[in-house]
Amino acid sequence: MQRALTVSVAGLAMIAASPAAHAQQDDRAIQAMQSELSAMRAAMDAMNARIEELEGELARTRSAKANGAIPADAVAAEQTAIAAAQAAPVPAEEAPQTTIAWNGGPELSHPDGWSFGVSGRLNYDAAYIDAPESTGRDEGFSSGARRLRVEFEGEVPGNFGYDLGIEVGSGEAVVMDATISHRSGPVTFMVGQHNTFQSMEELSSSLHTSFIERAAFTDAFVFERRIGVSAQYFQDDFLVQGGLFTDNIEALDNRNEGGDLRIAYTPRAGNTQLHIGGSVHYTDLDGLTDSLRYSQRPLARPPRTRFVDTGIFSADSETGIGAEAAAIFGRLHVAGEAFWQHVERTDFADPTFFGGYAEIGYFLTPGDRRGYKKGVFDRIRPANPLNEGGFGALQFNVRYDYLDLQEADITGGEQNLYGASLVWTPTDHTRLLMNYAYIDYDNAVIPTASGDNDYGVHSLSARAQLDF
């Protein structure tokens, strides 16, 4: 199943929590806990004083009884009162309470191990595609809501967690993530629908990518979320991810099955973050669908035109091998990946398709850098966000993206993409992106009126993004 992706332009600027605001919230939380502890100590001091008072009265009572002045039943009543005071519970208002935090969206947590949070994202895209008019695929301008997603996640006692994400696109609701997980030290086990482990570019959230669209091979080779069981290990800069998967939750009738393994080394030296890794992927196509189709749009959604397209062809299995590397040096970052997709076929030659990209980006605003966490690119947090009187973070990126879908008896075309992007991040949770790309096609599957299959296409797109 191919992911639903669309491209748009709209301006959104929302004020989100900055690092300073988070620090103020932490201070208030600490002060609240200190006040609560002080109140509890005062209550305990009062209770101890009352116990001492009762014990004194009991001693006096026993002395009086010894002299014959107090009946024995009065002494027993006094002892019962002391025992009741010692066993009295802490008042309800002083017991540990559910806390509510705000990290873009509300997060509720309880000391017993329960938690619940809500998050979401809004992406509005616009695109303009300029192709040779005689191809009949001069898309022109288009726009739409690319992602309208809400996600519910949290934990239950015993180090178990859950995640359910629903996205509305193309007029229908689609389940994105639906998982149950368990943490045991550095290992996390997961069952349900989630991303397979094939590519750094694919696993990095769409909220944090440097271009509106991911590298061509991730879409062309149909990287997607699938139902499966997996385990992830992260400790001492080493990341290992592996799992067994079937199909996407929307296509379980296919009954395909396979597995993925990804390993990465993620050391940090001073201000420099390094990443190097690789992955292996395998899918057995022995279900109801024993065919494949690889294709790609011209760096934009919603245009449906695919100038490179293998068409549907028979296949028994597919094996992918990927290599990835990245580095962040202060304001500068570099990244690149390569992926080979080998297809096994009966009675036909076995093709090996290829895709990859190389990218370099630089922040024009001092103090800003690209986010990174556990083997993927992460949130950009502006050093001087708009909501604190600053400008936000401004990033410029350039990328070369290559995809070859011509191999053996399959002529799906070849593309060389030269792209640039400008990304403005006013606050932690808002972004505006603009992309331009010139895509040079060889053996495009859509010829011009004169029969020419070698030509170029211009792609211009923009996005307004907010998440919470």
Image (cartoon, rainbow, N blue to C red):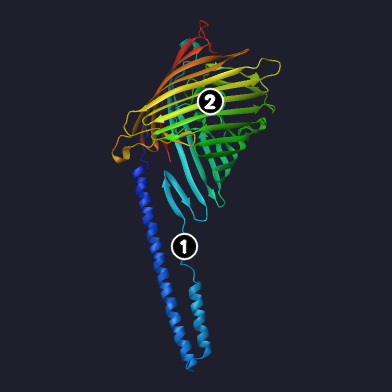
- What is the crowding at mark 2: few (fewer than 14 residues within 10 Å), some, or many (at least 20)? many
Instruction: Reply above or below: 435 against 444.
Output: below
* Residue 394 horizontal/vertical position (percent): 34, 30
The residue furthest bottom is 68
> Can you say which quadrant of the picture contains the C terminus?
top left
Disc 1 + disc 2, Cβ < 8 Å:
no
Q: Quadrant of residue 2?
A: top right
Q: Earlier in the sequence, mark 1 or mark 2?
A: 1
> Can you say which quadrant of the picture contains the N terminus?
top right
Residue 323, numbered circle: 2
Kindly identify the amino acid type of the residue bearing the numbered disc 2.
Answer: Ala
- What is the crowding at mark 1: few (fewer than 14 residues within 10 Å), some, or many (at least 20)? few
Residue 146, numbered circle: none
Q: Is residue 216 left or right of residue 270?
A: right
The residue furthest right is 347
* Residue 300 horizontal/vertical position (percent): 47, 23
Instruction: Reply above or below: 282 against 48.
Output: above
The answer, for residue 169, to whether it is visible in the render is: no
Distance CA(mark 1)–CA(mark 2): 52 Å
* Residue at x 38% of width, y 50% of height: 26
Q: Is residue 180 left or right of residue 302?
A: right
Kindly identify the amino acid type of the residue bearing the numbered disc 1.
Answer: Ala
Q: Quadrant of residue 242?
A: top right
* Residue 176 horizontal/vertical position (percent): 55, 36
Q: What residue is shown with label 1?
A: 95
* Residue at x 65% of width, y 22% of height: 291
SS class of the residue under badge 1? Answer: loop
